Image: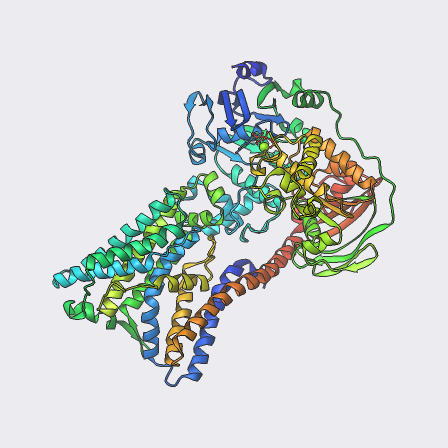
Amino acid sequence: MTWLRRRIRPEQIREFSLLLLIVVAVLIFGSAIDNYYTSRTFNRIASSVMIITVVAVGQTLVVLTRNIDLSVGSIVGCTAYVAGVRIAADNGLPAIVPVLIAVALGAAMGAINGVLVAWGRVPSIIVTLGTLAIFRGLLVDYSGARTVTTDSLPPWLVDLPRLDLFTLAGLHVKVMVALALAIVIAFQLATSYLTFARQFYALGSNPDAADLIGLPTRRIVLTAFVLSGALSGLAGFMTLARFGNITVEAGRGLELEVVAAAVVGGVNIFGGSGTVIGAMLGGVMIGTLEQSLLRLQINEFWRDAVMGLLILLAVASDAVILKRLRALWARADLEMIARSAPRTGEAP
Amino acid sequence: MEGAAVDRRSDAPAVNAPMLNLRDITKRFGATQALEGVSLTLRAGRVHALLGENGAGKSTLIKIMTGVHQPDHGEMLLAGRPLRLASAAEAQRHGIAAIYQEPLLFPDLNVAENIFISHQDRGAVTNWRQMFRRAEEILASLGVALDVRSPARGLTLAAQQSVEIAKAISLNVRVLIMDEPTASLSSHEVAQLFKLVRDLREKDVAILFVSHRMEEVFEIADDVTVFRDGRLISTRPRAEVTPQRAIADMVGREMGLLQPRSPAKLGEKLLSVRGLGRDGAFEDVSFDLRRGEVLGFAGLIGAGRTDVGLALFGIEPATSGQIVLDGRAVTIRSPRQAMALGIAYSSEDRRQLGLSLPMSIATNITLPVLSRYLNWLGLVRTGMERATAEAFRRRLAIRTPSVDIAVSKLSGGNQQKVMLSKWLNTHPALLILDEPTRGIDVGAKAEVHAIIGELAAEGIGIIMISSDLPEVLAMSDRVLVMREGRQMAVLDRDGADQESVMAAAMGQSTARQPSGAEA
Ligand SMILES: Nc1ncnc2c1ncn2[C@@H]1O[C@H](COP(=O)(O)OP(=O)(O)OP(=O)(O)O)[C@@H](O)[C@H]1O
Ligand SMILES: [Mg+2]
């Protein structure tokens, strides 16, 4: 038991408990809704979650550094539209081109946020609240309120959301869902092992100390915003593929769902702690609730209220549970140290 | 120019080449002249001690050496080459590392990562297993038992300082600067640290060491430099200085060393604690305290002394045991409640629990008893507030242009004096002082001890937690010794000496054997 405690930290149990919560939610909905356990339900939830998740990964990076990116919804809208216009104009373009356009444009928009926050010393909530409106405004102006329509897009793009990567026990795992999962895994590994990414945690945990010991704080903040923008760009492309019809409204309000996913997933809004996997689980939790409450034909306003409640619960329980767990762990440590006492006693 | 010439006749041979030369360094903060024309030479393989009263400019000089501050005037040479530093990262690339006076840890990162966060040779990809192992090795060489996998959040100040030391000594440095690294360590950890410092000295590292504890300075230093009011007063090899001489240079007059307190008349029983414990922190602590008594708490790092203080003040309430205060059984769940019961607690961690840094000195001092400073309209009488602050400023020699200045602008020791003033001013029934003289210079320390004596004579019961054993022995009527969350012994004035306290703190069955075998 003590051995287990040495390996597993309270922070990791949090993700596990969220997973458990998701299972409980699915069981409850399964008993309340006929034909709930079908691959159709799975696909619905998965394809609504995948876009939130990709953006939430980027949001997590930003929040870790004690910042926030509220412009992601607008970046998704802009990149979806611009990539859509480009591919609609020339259906013969190779598939990689619209992806690259969306990602590059997203990264550029993220860079604007990053430079203003890191060098301009403007709080990120103000910067991104501004660019949220500005990016959306530019989109409205650029599009002239026209829309990208499904029939202007090449068939491969329209069929992409339905393309299976593989089928397992009747579950069709879509290419795009797999892509989202791959991104989660890649960023989870990067944030656990890459030295540069570990500095994101350090910066968010104690910005003054980060400055004083000479971490490249500006570069860290810029990188976080650029990655958030780039991932939002990718999500823009996924939005284009999923819906086909892109209006100037695309991605509006997404930022709230994304921030909610991160917070429910245990990412500390004050920076320094949280994981990419946690943010994904938060996204899954929100997506499951959203789709299931929809199936239950619950009034939209109630649905929002339930979401809000969930967020409050997540944050509150987080604080309480973690504190309890830490006390438990501390006791185990004390026992361990007490047992090794003779050794430390004769150290000199 | 002067400084370089003064230490010409060092007793070591010529192998001690100058490593870092400072020439004519000047630094101003607004109205405060922090440094004026300071010249100093650190040599390879020598430990250079820097002494000076609080606010003399020691930390400022250090921050200039590490690129945190830029000097207004003057130059630096590293191994003979001109050195310009724009940031701490640049200093580290040149092999200059520092342990700052205030620990700078990342609460969300685990202990091991805190040690290695700024290592250049950490590589692009982290090998966690190896990092944990190396962190454990380094901490073991310091004689400190910490779980390297747990986050740094909530570590006691002493543990934080150990992590800082581990961070600095694990770097491959040419110049190592330590700003009061021992301020909250007990003699056991200090001995371990000094062993490591001597190893580094063997490896030709140039070391600068700041401390207000004379006995430490004279144990480890090869050269001693004294600052006063931002000026360099003297630099001499240790053999040519005595503690009395150094103190006279520091304060500009002759001054006595630590005096034992003459015990006050003890009154009736004030506090009785039985089987007190908190899960994961400490257990089964029992003691009595009478009015006018000073009960010292001694022990090593992580012994749980601070946790007892936090429990009595309701910051981290106890989970078991009884507290009887003034004959009444009480459960203390919050600081607010503790203060209503007449308990005051001066924290060891002035930055996190003690002071509001952006607020002025005067408002910080009067904050806990602000109601005494209100006029009939409920407004603060700032004149009265300032008078109180001025009184403490004179008595404790708080070095500041005015009591309206933000506390964040003060030197570490002067911040400590402000926090102490704040709690001394409350006149509680029970006063808990956690490392009251941490980072305070010798002159002011004697003043603090005098005030503590006066408060005890007024009938206040005082619990004094301190890592400075000579201080505990001089001030206490009885000494309670803790080790790893357990109470080991309560020694009375005659039974408590350096050996008996250390033996109990190290867990050797004690006191009864007159002079126990040194470990
Ligand atoms: N950031 C700052 N802004 C304004 N004044 C400052 C600042 N830092 C230091 N000072 C002032 O410079 C003087 C020297 O401070 P410094 O911290 O170097 O003292 P010190 O010798 O380290 O003292 P201590 O023993 O208390 O740590 C003090 O009067 C202090 O108030
Ligand atoms: Mg200082």
Which of the colour schemes (rainbow, by chain, secondary structure, one colour) is used?
Answer: rainbow
Q: In which quarter of the image is residue B235?
A: top right
Above or below, B31 relative to B458: above
The C terminus of chain A lies in which quarter of the figure? top right
Q: Residue furthest bottom?
A: A34
Q: In which quarter of the image is residue B375?
A: top right
Q: Which residue lies furthest to the front in this view?
A: B377
Q: Which residue is drawn at 37% across and 59% down?
A: A57
Q: Residue A204, how many percent across, how many down?
A: 46, 49
Above or below, A213 relative to A229: above
Q: Which of A101 and B399 is in front in this view?
A: B399
Q: Residue A7, how many percent across, how many down?
A: 52, 59
Does the image show residue A283? yes
Q: Residue B101, how many percent across, how many down?
A: 57, 36
Q: Tell how many labels.
A: 0
Horizontally, residue B226 falls left or right of residue A75, namely: right
Q: Residue A288, how many percent across, how many down?
A: 39, 73
Above or below, B20 relative to B327: above
Image quadrant of ligand 1 equals top right
Does the image show residue B19? no
Q: Which of B109 and A108 is in front in this view?
A: A108
